[in-house]
Amino acid sequence: MELAITGGRALLSDQGLVTADIGVQDGVIAEISGPERRFDATGLLVLPGIIDLHGDAFERQVQPRPGVSFPMDLAVAETEAQLLANGITTTFHGVTLSWEKGLRSAETWTSLLAALAANRPRQSCDMRIHLRWEAFNLPALDLALAAIEQGAVHLLAFNDHTPGILRKMADAATGAKYSERAGMKLDAFRDLANAIGTRADEVPAALARMAEAAQRAGIPMASHDDARVADRDAFRAMGARISDFPMSTEVAKAATEAGDSVIMGSPNVVRGGSHMGWSGAAETVEAGFCQILTSDYFYPAMLRAAFILADRHGQDGLAARWALISANPAAAAGLTDRGRIAQGLRADMVIVSRDPAPHVVATIAGGKLAYLSAEGAARLH
């Protein structure tokens, strides 16, 4: 027996939140037997590891300031440390592959894939790729198709930010935010964007090729920022059964009623609303039109959001709301081996204290004790 977690209240898949002892052996959840390291979880909660389907906070490790980049291996290592400290045991890095230069370029994409592959033998967090495909990025179409075919992509999302960028180019201050991220002068960036915009007629065929490749590879697909029900319907027809950040409750409702999974951001819940002025995530969850919460741009928000929503429903609210960041994203991503605490499943768990506010005491990822706070170290025997 590698590890026994004892005395805590565990969220078990078949019993709900009950006092239970849990064993970990060979990376999976097992019965407790024989000598073991023992983690005393008395007074703590033992919950399924958090699964983040859409997190792009890693971009701040790659480029903490506009135009200021750091080595990719360093960025990946620091990102993993942050993920584990926040109880996230499986993450889908939301990597935007755009026609832009700099942070969201083909060069950054290639460098990140290489760094993740090199890091994989020693990583604890299961770090995967959520390819946010920018619809107008026709020059990188073959690069993206190859990555899907090679198994480097685990979730494909269709993005179309180019029309919005083109509209914003008229304002120098707003345009400068994009040009700085790309490491370009504003005029040069404006010329590049305008040139890309002239190829709109080629976009539908490219989207169809991407969808066909994802279907062949058996990976889930999503559409991002669905503005209208008609948009969601069109992407569903292409095989995309996830609505990633719908822009209105109307779209989220229609998606849910059609059997799609709806994703919204945990920061929206924690802050009390969308910083973009769109639908409130908490209200959409309560209405039954959002099944998954993600970190979006702030990893600590996932755990806090689940507890904020759970506390609205008293003592029995945690099981349903924790599923927003564990069982539900696992199901949407086709990950049948995680998202719940049950014998034989991957041993991904986060041990949480609620005193004085919800925070991570320890994280177990793939059976490894991957993060341990000072409070947690005092409980390990």
Image (spheres, rainbow, N blue to C red):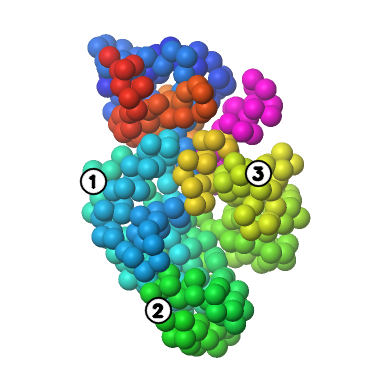
Residue at the location (32% across, 64% down)? 69
Residue 272 badge:
3
Residue 375 placement, left or right of 334:
left
Answer with mark 2 or mark 3, whichever residue precedes in sequence.
2
Where disc 2 sits, the SS reads: loop
Q: Reading the chain from its start, which is encountered first: label 2 or label 1? A: 1
- Residue type at numbered disc 1: Pro
Question: Is any part of residue 69 visible from this angle?
Answer: yes
Distance between the Cα atoms at labels 2 and 3? 35 Å
- Position of residue 36 relative to residue 236, above or below, is above
Q: In this rendering, would 38 be left or right of 353?
A: left
Q: Quadrant of the N terminus?
A: top left
Which class describes the residues within 10 Å of circle 3: few (<14), some (14-19), or many (20+)?
A: some
Q: Main secondary structure of the magenta part?
A: helix
Q: Could you say where residue 66 lies in the image, as x and y percent from the top left? A: 40, 66
Tell me which segment is drawn in magenta: 307-332
Q: CA distance from mark 3 to mark 1?
A: 39 Å
Q: Position of residue 255 (x, y in %)?
A: 69, 53
